[in-house]
Image (cartoon, rainbow, N blue to C red):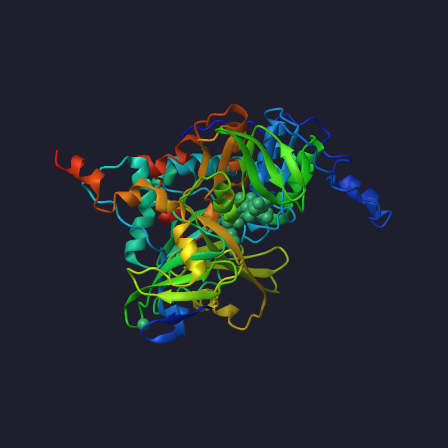
């Protein structure tokens, strides 16, 4: 695929004032960390902006940051109805990988991976990106064969990926149960070593701080309630804090995409569903990588605090309630205990749900609309955290230039009438 | 966990059911030629209401019959259960049916036999 390095933007150093560093940490320690500055301002909305981003999740904040850092568009606001990162950004299990089947997906997820690899430095914020590997396991002959097809496709796109047999898996992950007599035995798997996890809150905060530093207004507790149009053009947004004028609006509201689209009479192929996750009490390190299984709808990793982080498949009905049904995690935990018997006495500490925006082909929408100045970046469904930087990067480019770049182009809304779907159910439909 | 009132078996646990998504999507007839974009309204575009939503459920691990549910997607309250091929009776659910954007689409019109089907279909 021969991808160039993404344009990370010209962010005049030092970013954020003062810059975060080991030295700054030591200095502040002298004062018992009493005088850390605010990481971003809390401004009143101005009456007009050059562009408005609706939704202060990772994707929205990244979009604003790259608009300012790469495209020099600084007079912008991110409008968030709750608090930044309080949506799926702060609810996800943070699995990051770029091992998707199709070229279109490889392009955007690998673009994202490259941005992850430099993010802590770019933002001067430790996002705790940890390339501990993501291992997807197979439980049947058929799955294993399908997997090797996928691995070859991924490697043809220049992305690291390798097949492991069950003995190699056991060597890599000593706590896993590879007994072949269990209901879904581990028959093999594939590993992306560059995959891993990151600290979700830090991603939102890091982008917020860096965007704020470049002049972006981050406006929290402000809900967009309407999109004002003049003919087929956007002229502003109605919010719970009044009308704000603008010519360009980027909607990055995940589970609420259909609600915001309806404000402009647009209908999306999106269904909003609950997706649930749990964390356990913290324990000593027992798992050094991320394990995913599409067949038993389970994925697991261990946070740096020692908690086991577990996620399940999506619930079966539409919902905006940010909670799902108990049967889903129950089913997943049964599989987790069979694969990792060491977990059987572990107590779960927290359990929550997020509302994810699922698309019929399990691929996102990054698109203009038939209303001038109105753009959508949504449909990331169960697996958009990993795409946060890449999505923000190409969406900023779309908003700045009013045309999609090569990476974004396949993700138009038109694909649902042209039939050019990007079917990633195999790689994205179940796990993350 | 939802408790779903199957019209045939009574209230049962959600795990016995499969959810069929948005109800009342009529398939355009082949002879009523419509554009790809209009066909996409039938095939891919979905109502994704926050609030009262009309949807289909299948009692897949029970009587195996399909039925419709009017359910609030924000509170999870079930407002009405009603048979396939019919419309809900409660006023709120009726409004949600008649005010849906789908009622105005060519895809839905092309699902019905009508004047504009016949001229095209005979060619
Ligand atoms: C339990 C769970 C586990 C997951 N695990 C993974 C994983 O391991 N790996 C992975 O890659 N992905 C995962 N995902 C998916 C991932 O979290 C999302 O795709 C991604 O975080 C979406 O980011 P976002 O910024 O678009 O959305 P969000 O972070 O949800 O941001 C959208 C924001 O828009 C705001 N908003 C909505 N409506 C309005 C309005 N009218 N006005 C103003 N603001 C509004 C919301 O309050 C919200 O803060 C998971 C999701 C969940 C729920
Ligand atoms: Zn029944």
The total of numbered circles placed on residues is 0
In this view, the residue farthest toward the left is: B123
Residue A127 pos. (x, y %): 63, 44
Q: Nearer the viewer, residue A173 or A86?
A: A86
In the image, taking residue A160 as reference, residue A183 lies left or right, namely left
Q: Nearer the viewer, residue A431 or A212?
A: A212
Q: Is residue A195 visible?
A: no
Residue A129 pos. (x, y %): 59, 45
In the image, taking residue B76 as reference, residue B9 lies left or right, namely left
Residue A375 pos. (x, y %): 50, 33
Position of residue A116 relative to residue A200, above or below, is: above
Q: Nearer the viewer, residue A219 or A366?
A: A219
Position of residue A166 relative to residue A226, above or below, is: below
Q: Quadrant of residue A37?
A: top right
The residue under the point 44% across, 62% down is B71
Q: Is residue A66 visible?
A: yes
The residue under the point 29% across, 62% down is B84
In this view, the residue farthest toward the right is: A31
The residue under the point 49% across, 56% down is B51
In this view, the residue farthest toward the bottom is: B10
Q: Quadrant of residue A205?
A: top right
Please state the quadrant of the image where ligand 2 appears. Answer: bottom left
The residue under the point 43% across, 67% down is A331
Position of residue A418 relative to residue B107, above or below, is: above
């Amino acid at each position: 695929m021969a991808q160039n390095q993404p344009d990370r933007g010209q962010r005049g150093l030092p970013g954020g004032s003062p810059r975060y560093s080991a030295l700054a940490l030591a200095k502040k320690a002298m004062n018992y960390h009493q005088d850390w500055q605010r990481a971003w301002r809390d401004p009143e909305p101005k009456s007009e902006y050059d562009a408005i981003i609706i939704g202060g999740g990772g994707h929205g904040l990244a979009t604003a940051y790259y608009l300012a850092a790469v495209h020099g568009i600084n007079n912008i606001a991110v409008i968030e109805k709750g608090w930044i990162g309080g949506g799926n950004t702060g609810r996800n299990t943070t699995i990051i990988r770029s091992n998707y089947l199709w070229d279109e997906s490889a392009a955007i997820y690998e673009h994202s991976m490259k941005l992850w690899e430099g993010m802590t430095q770019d933002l001067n914020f430790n996002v705790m990106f940890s390339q501990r590997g993501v291992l997807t396991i197979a439980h049947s002959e058929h799955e294993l064969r399908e997997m090797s097809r996928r691995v070859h496709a991924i490697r043809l796109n220049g992305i690291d990926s390798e097949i492991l047999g069950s003995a190699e898996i056991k060597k890599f992950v000593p706590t896993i149960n590879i007994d072949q007599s269990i209901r879904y035995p581990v028959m093999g798997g594939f590993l992306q070593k560059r995959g891993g996890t990151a600290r979700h809150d830090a991603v939102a905060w890091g982008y917020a701080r860096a965007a704020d530093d470049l002049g972006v207004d981050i406006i929290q507790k402000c809900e967009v309630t309407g999109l004002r149009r003049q003919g087929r053009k956007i002229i502003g947004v109605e919010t719970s804090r009044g009308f704000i004028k603008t010519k360009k609006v980027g909607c990055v509201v995940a589970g609420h995409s259909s609600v915001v689209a309806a404000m402009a009479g647009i209908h999306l192929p999106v269904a909003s569903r609950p997706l649930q996750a749990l964390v356990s009490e913290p324990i000593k390190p027992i798992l050094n990588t991320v394990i995913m299984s599409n067949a038993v709808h389970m994925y697991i990793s261990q946070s740096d605090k020692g908690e086991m982080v577990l996620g399940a498949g999506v619930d079966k009905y539409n919902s905006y309630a940010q909670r799902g049904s108990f049967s889903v995690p129950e089913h997943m935990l049964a599989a987790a205990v069979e694969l990792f018997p060491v977990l059987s006495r572990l107590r779960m500490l927290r359990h929550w749900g997020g509302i994810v925006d699922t698309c019929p082909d399990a691929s996102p929408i990054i698109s203009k609309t038939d209303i001038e100045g109105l753009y959508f970046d949504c449909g990331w469904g169960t697996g958009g955290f990993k795409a946060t930087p890449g999505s923000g990067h190409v969406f900023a480019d779309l908003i700045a230039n009013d045309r999609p770049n090569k990476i974004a182009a396949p993700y138009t809304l038109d694909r649902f009438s042209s039939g050019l779907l990007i079917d990633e159910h195999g790689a994205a439909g179940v796990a993350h | 966990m939802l408790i779903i009132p199957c019209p045939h078996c009574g209230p049962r646990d959600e795990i016995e059911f499969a959810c069929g998504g948005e109800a009342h999507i009529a398939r355009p007839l082949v002879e009523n030629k419509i554009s790809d974009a209009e066909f996409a309204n039938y095939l891919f575009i979905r109502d994704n209401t926050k609030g009262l939503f009309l949807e289909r459920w299948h009692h897949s691990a029970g009587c195996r019959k399909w039925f419709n549910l009017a359910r609030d997607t924000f509170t999870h309250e079930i407002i009405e259960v009603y048979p396939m091929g019919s419309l809900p009776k409660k006023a709120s659910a009726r409004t949600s049916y008649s005010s849906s954007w789908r009622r105005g689409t060519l895809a839905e019109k092309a699902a019905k036999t009508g004047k504009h089907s016949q001229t095209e279909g005979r060619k």
